[in-house]
Amino acid sequence: MKKIKIKKGDKIKVICGEHKGSEGKVVKILKEKNKLIVEGINIVKKHLKPNSQNPKGGIKEVESPIHISNVILLTPNGESTKVGFRFEDGKKVRYAKKTNEIL
């Protein structure tokens, strides 16, 4: 399993697939599947059976996972960049390789 360099709360951009060019914030990471759920991207309709909370059932729109290889991290000023790691003051920190900023 490859190391995931994107974390929950990061702003990302989709670089390939149906939603190419879309930007959003990471809501959840599914580490064992190498996928992540992004706010407002890859929305699918889920059909719900009637139950005690929802007696009529219905159709609900939910975000579906997207593979981690299809996204790239965005810096705070909106540039796409790769992620690197380095040690500063004895702590391991993530930094943007393009701008050399700490993330």
Image (cartoon, rainbow, N blue to C red):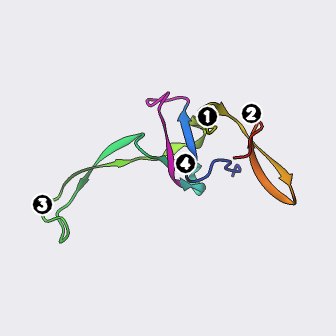
Q: Which residues are magenta?
A: 15-28
Residue at horizontal 74 percent and vertical 40 percent from the top:
101
Q: Which residue is mark 3?
A: 56
Q: Which residue is mark 4?
A: 35
Q: Residues within 10 Å of mark 2 (few under 14, many from 20)?
A: few
**Alpha-carbon distance for marks 4 and 3?**
32 Å
Give the mark nearer the N terminus: 4 vs 2.
4
- 24 on left or right of 102: left
Q: Residues within 10 Å of mark 3 (few under 14, many from 20)?
A: few
Q: Nearer the viewer, mark 4 or mark 2?
A: 2
Q: Nearer the viewer, mark 1 or mark 3?
A: 1
Residue 91's spot in the image, x, y percent?
A: 82, 59
Give the mark nearer the N terminus: 4 vs 3.
4
- 29 on left or right of 75: left
**Alpha-carbon distance for marks 2 and 1?**
10 Å
Residue at horizontal 61 percent and vertical 52 percent from the top:
7
Residue 1's spot in the image, x, y percent?
A: 69, 52
**Alpha-carbon distance for marks 4 and 1?**
25 Å
Query: Cβ–Cβ below 8 Å for labels 2 and 1?
Result: yes
Element type where label 3 sits in the image: loop
Label tally: 4
Going by the numbered disc 4, the residue's amino acid type is Lys
Residue 10's spot in the image, x, y percent?
A: 58, 47
Residue 99: mark in rendering: 2
Going by the numbered disc 3, the residue's amino acid type is Lys
* Residue 43, picture quadrant: top left
Outermost residue on the bottom side: it is 52
Q: Which residue is mark 1?
A: 77
**Alpha-carbon distance for marks 4 and 2?**
26 Å
